[in-house]
Image: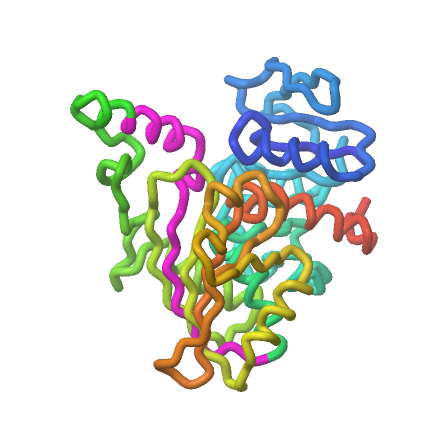
Amino acid sequence: MNIAIVGATGNVGRKTLEVLEKKELSIDNLYLVASSKSAGKKISFKGKEHEVFDLENFDFSKVRIAFFAAGGKISEKFAEKAAKNCIVIDNSSFYRMDPDVPLIVPQVNSDDLKNNKKNIIANPNCSTAQLVIVLKPLHDLFIIKRIVVSTYQSVSGGGKAPMDELIEQTKSVLDGKEVKSKNFTKQIAFNAIPHIDVFSDDGYTKEELKMTNETKKILDRKIDLTATCVRLPISVSHSEAVNLQFEKPFSLEKVRDALNNFDGCKVIDERVDGGYITPLEAEGKDETFISRIREDKTIKNGLNLWIVSDNLLRGAALNAVEIAETLIKNNFYGK
C-alpha cells in the first residue's frame, strides 16, 4: 500500500512516522509531503532516506491513504482535493464537526467509519481522544449523565514553536532576564494559563467547546459536559481531572476491571506515595493511564478520575495510524 504524510516535517508528522515504524503496516511506497520551504529535505524512515515533496504539486492518485498533519488551513485547502483519489485521515480541527465526516477513536466508535461520505476521516482533539477512550467502557456499563473535566495540557499541543518558547522562557527566568511571550497570552514558564484557543461569547474557549462537541459526536449526544482547559509548562502529555455522574450505581472494582480490560487503557492507582501516573511518565507510551479512582461522595453515582496520555500519540499520531489499521482490516480504504 502507498501512503502519504502531509506535514511530515512537523511535530505530528514526525510522530506519525515513529508510530508507523513500530507498527506492522505493509507500506510499499511512503511519500513525505510538506510546504515548498521543506521540499527537498531528507527524512529517514526504516533506515532509508526519503525526500520531501512539495504539497502544491503532489499527485494524491499515487496513494491510498494520506495522513494530514499540517493544520486546519492546509486541510481546508487540500484535503478534499486529495480525497478525490485517496482516503484522508485529518489531524486538524477543520472537519471534526462536519456531519458527513466521521470523527473516530477506533476503540470507541469504529462503526462510524461506514458513514464516510467525503473520503475524509477526522482525528479528534488531543484532550478529547484520551478522554473518550476512558469514558467508553464506563458509559457502556453505567451510562454517563454528566462530565466535569479540567485539563492540564502540555505546550506541545500548540506545536513545535511553543515547545521551543517554553525552553527559552525557562532559561530567561532562571537567568533573571525579561520574559517575552510570543506563542502564549502570558508567560508560560513556571506558570499556568487558563486559556487555550480563542474565547467565544459565552466565556468558554474554543478548546473547551471542542471537548464538549466532540465527546458528544463520538460517544453520546445525550451526555452533558463542561470543561476548563489550562496550559501548563510541560513539554509533552496532557492530564485531566474528571468528575463523572452515572445513571446507574457502580463499584470501584467494576470500574477498575472495565478500564484495565479496555484496549488502550491502563490503570495505575495505588493509594501510596507515587502510586499514580504523571505526564513525564506517560510521554512516549501508547496507553492512556488512569489514576486516583475514587467515589465522589457529594453526588449520587459520582466518580473521580485522573487521566494522563501522550498527546502526540493518543491525541494525534497513534490514533491516526490506528484509524488506518482499522480501515485496512475492514477493507474500507477504497481504491
Picture coordinates of residue 119, whole percent (x, y): 68, 50
Report if residue 165 lies within the magenta region.
yes
Residue bounds of the magenta highlight: 142-170
Name the image quarter holding the N terminus: top right
The image quadrant where one finds the C terminus is: top right
Residue shown at 67% from the left, 17% from the top: 51
Quarter occupied by residue 66: top right
Counting every numbered tag in the picture gives 0
- The residue located at (38%, 83%) in the rendering is 299
Expressed as whole percent of the image width and height from the top left, the position of residue 190 reads 26, 38
| Location of residue 157 (image quadrant) | top left
At horizontal 28% and vertical 53% (from top left) the residue drawn is 199
In the rendered image of this protein, does residue 274 appear above or below residue 63? below
- Give the residue at the far front of this rendering: 272
113 or 260: which is nearer to us?
Answer: 260
Residue for point 54% across, 66% down: 217
Q: Position of residue 257 (x, y in %)?
A: 64, 70
Q: Nearer the viewer, residue 304 or 10?
A: 304
Left/right placement of residue 22 relative to residue 198 reads: right
Q: Position of residue 251 (x, y in %)?
A: 56, 80
Q: Is residue 72 visible?
A: no
Q: Is residue 276 above or below residue 316?
A: below
Residue 230 visible? The answer is yes
